[in-house]
Image (spheres, coloured by chain):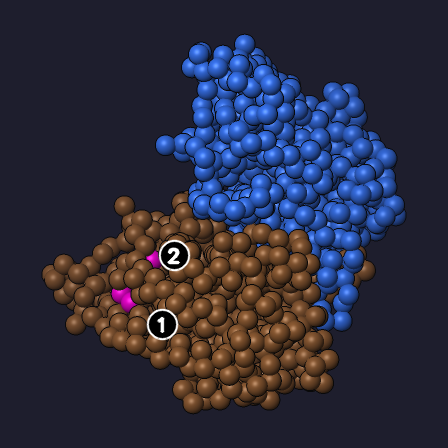
Chain colours: A blue, B brown
Amino acid sequence: MITRALVGDAYTPVNANEVAYLPQALIEIDSSGRIDRVTPAADPSYAARLKAAEVQHLVEHLPADQVIWPGFVDLHVHAPQWPQAGLALDKPLAAWLNDYTFPLEAKYDDLAFAKRVYHELVHELLSQGTTTVLFFGTIHTAANLELARQCMQQGLRAAIGRVAMDNPDQTPDYYRDASAGEAVAATERFIHQLKELGAENPLAPLPVITPRFVPSCSDEALAGLGRLAHQYDLPIQTHVSESNWEHQYAIDRFGMHDAAVLDHFGLLTEKAVLAHGTQLAPKDQALLRERGSALAHCPISNAYFGNGVLPVQELLAAGNQVGLGTDISGGYSPSLYDNLRHAVALSQVRNDGVTTQDAGTAGSRISMTTAFYLATLGGAKALHLPVGQVQAGCLADLQVVSDRFTRPAESPQDRFERLMYQTTARELRQVIVHGETVIDHAG
Amino acid sequence: MITRALVGDAYTPVNANEVAYLPQALIEIDSSGRIDRVTPAADPSYAARLKAAEVQHLVEHLPADQVIWPGFVDLHVHAPQWPQAGLALDKPLAAWLNDYTFPLEAKYDDLAFAKRVYHELVHELLSQGTTTVLFFGTIHTAANLELARQCMQQGLRAAIGRVAMDNPDQTPDYYRDASAGEAVAATERFIHQLKELGAENPLAPLPVITPRFVPSCSDEALAGLGRLAHQYDLPIQTHVSESNWEHQYAIDRFGMHDAAVLDHFGLLTEKAVLAHGTQLAPKDQALLRERGSALAHCPISNAYFGNGVLPVQELLAAGNQVGLGTDISGGYSPSLYDNLRHAVALSQVRNDGVTTQDAGTAGSRISMTTAFYLATLGGAKALHLPVGQVQAGCLADLQVVSDRFTRPAESPQDRFERLMYQTTARELRQVIVHGETVIDHAG
């Protein structure tokens, strides 16, 4: 049953190199939260379908200054780090972790604190146009469940991981799993509790197997988490070769590259989403392709902590799955708009080089169309969710954005690019998740 | 005479490496638009001064969630390019110029068009917290004067250049000065007309000698413009070694580097502001230091067109003058907040390198404190204007920004960094120029 219809100029990703423009499309949404049908204005059935929907008072005609595109998919958010977004980014990684991040994450054994932060964060992400998020939580089950509750209450589609971290050499004593057994058992309990909490809710967050990263985990924990992922057929999230340090750590401890370590423990599946990957060697990239594991490209965070710029264009051309992530708080911004703009600009820097002596790496540049793909369909594919497109059969997760400026002579492609460069939270009129408007600045 | 006083937590740049925090400072503004006195809460005279101002009903106590810092100084805006901000950034420079930029700039012989665009642009810049702008106009005197009118009406401090471009090899026939003589004569006429237009107005824009860049100008035009700059003791703006192409062009035509060409024609003065400079050789950087000429660092634009990342930290350490510019529309964003964040992130990329083989250039990283300096005091010094600080004697050009989040445990330095990373136009409560509130979202 159609419950709602929007009429307006829409943009939707077709693939990494193409965006489709659908002027005055009729977008019909059904009671299951899906897009039932997208009818272009030129379709012979358009007038009749529009009239039928109008008779039922289901149609919302967007003003001429508004456009529609899919909600964004954020593949990498450390929910507990939100209060420190923008802090300590000029500190060395060790200071960032030990003086800021670990003490902050440890605070989530206080459920009232967790509730306050997670309420704020979920609202913030939605108000930036993000409609699906892959979250790292903390080691605290109650706080992680509170994050899930906030997502369901405010209408954010989510997948949430209880972080596992038991290696005493790389974690502080005040914030650590007591043992490998406890890391795995607590993860398994969280899976059941989250499923119970979300029962009957269409926005029930998916549980995600979440070894923090290889350095934080013992061999036994990594192996146990790999087994859980297969047993429950769940997504996996972790970091891979994020920095020179992380890349070298795996070599020193295992005599293998970071990606190969994950593979060894059964953690490179087609449901795995690996953050960063700036230091992956070509053979590691090939291994990810072979396994169907996706990369979460976090351009802002990588500038601070990645020791390099991810070769996005090369990875996409080779067939790797890639989406986009804010990496709060390695990245300061909760906005995927900010991140897609950085993705384009940094790809250009990779292409052209940095110093006057440096010729760069030709072929590294990505277009805004590609960045849009990363923030929508690329992320959707990584999570195997039917979102990220304005298309029949997709879940109705959408953004309605206003164009503050009148540019009569512009082509649809130019308008798309300009809006991708200019849109901020201020320009969002509606954010729609599962067919429901969850952020409403339409007035 | 004190006409207005603000009380609130303020931040002000001290130098490129230091920002001062002034909790609950009393900022008294006089009838000449200047800050008469800044009294810290700890000052023995604070209570008496505050009471005296309160008795006269002059005091505005800012809410606890608001902070004050100086308005930003944008050293590089092509005003006519505003309608294409965000367009064609993935096109080669030639296509960007010939298919987009020159046809657009040529349209400003239509004064109604100019008025519409310049009204919108001046409002947009103010609403992003920018209070002083160094503008390139077009070759059209009437349109340039309209830009000046908009600045005075809306309250934006500005310096404006009538663009000179007479070289038939590098400019299109529909948008070019008829001759070198005309390029110089039209510039001189503009100087007088602008002075006349601004007579008696405290925000009268300063005229600026503006050869577009070396390739656009004949030798005779460059020489004539250099003479005008000295004759009228005026600021100069142009581009310098913006890209590999521009850098090589000067070598091919003159057998000299771009900076040396400008110097040869008397265009490297201590009042010169040179945009970009990414390809400057060390000897060019030294020449700029010797002449006291400033660089407008345009980090976003440079990512697209600069073929490199400006070594800001190295330049500041060596004693070069540097400020910040949006370079609309080589840069897509009218916000110096966006640009200062890119300045920090890109300095980090320069520091760490791009590829897995590339070790980067140690010592290139700038802090947010340095980026804040570039956007405030650095720009003020480049223009020799007493702005960019919350300090007695400075013109009262200020921003009042709200902090949407409550972070009780944060240090003042952490709060400063977080706000610099999170502030957008949405968070601006007031923009004050010359003591008057020109953007008011205080309610």
| Gap between marks 2 and 1 measured at Cα | 21 Å
Q: Are marks 2 and 1 on the same chain?
A: yes
The one of B354 and B268 positioned closer to us in this rendering? B268
Classify B360 as above or below B67. Answer: below
Residue at (45, 23) in percent of width and height: A60
Give the secondary structure at mark 2: helix
Residue at (26, 62) in percent of width and height: B436
Classify B104 as above or below B224. Answer: above
Q: Chain of mark 2?
A: B
Where residue B33 appears, x then y in whole percent? 26, 70
The one of A86 and A326 positioned closer to us in this rendering? A326
Magenta span of residues: B431-435
The residue tagged 2 is B112
Q: Is residue A251 visible?
A: yes
Where residue A140 appears, x then y in whole percent? 58, 32
Q: Chain of mark 1?
A: B
The residue tagged 1 is B205
The one of A86 and B262 positioned closer to us in this rendering? B262
User: Callout 1, which amino acid?
Assistant: Pro
Give the secondary structure at mark 1: loop
Q: Is residue B314 visible?
A: no
Residue lying farthest to the left in this orientation? B55
Classify A362 as above or below A323. Answer: below
Q: Quadrant of the N terminus of chain A?
A: top right
The one of B242 and A285 positioned closer to us in this rendering? B242
Can you tell which quarter of the image residue A136 is in?
Answer: top right
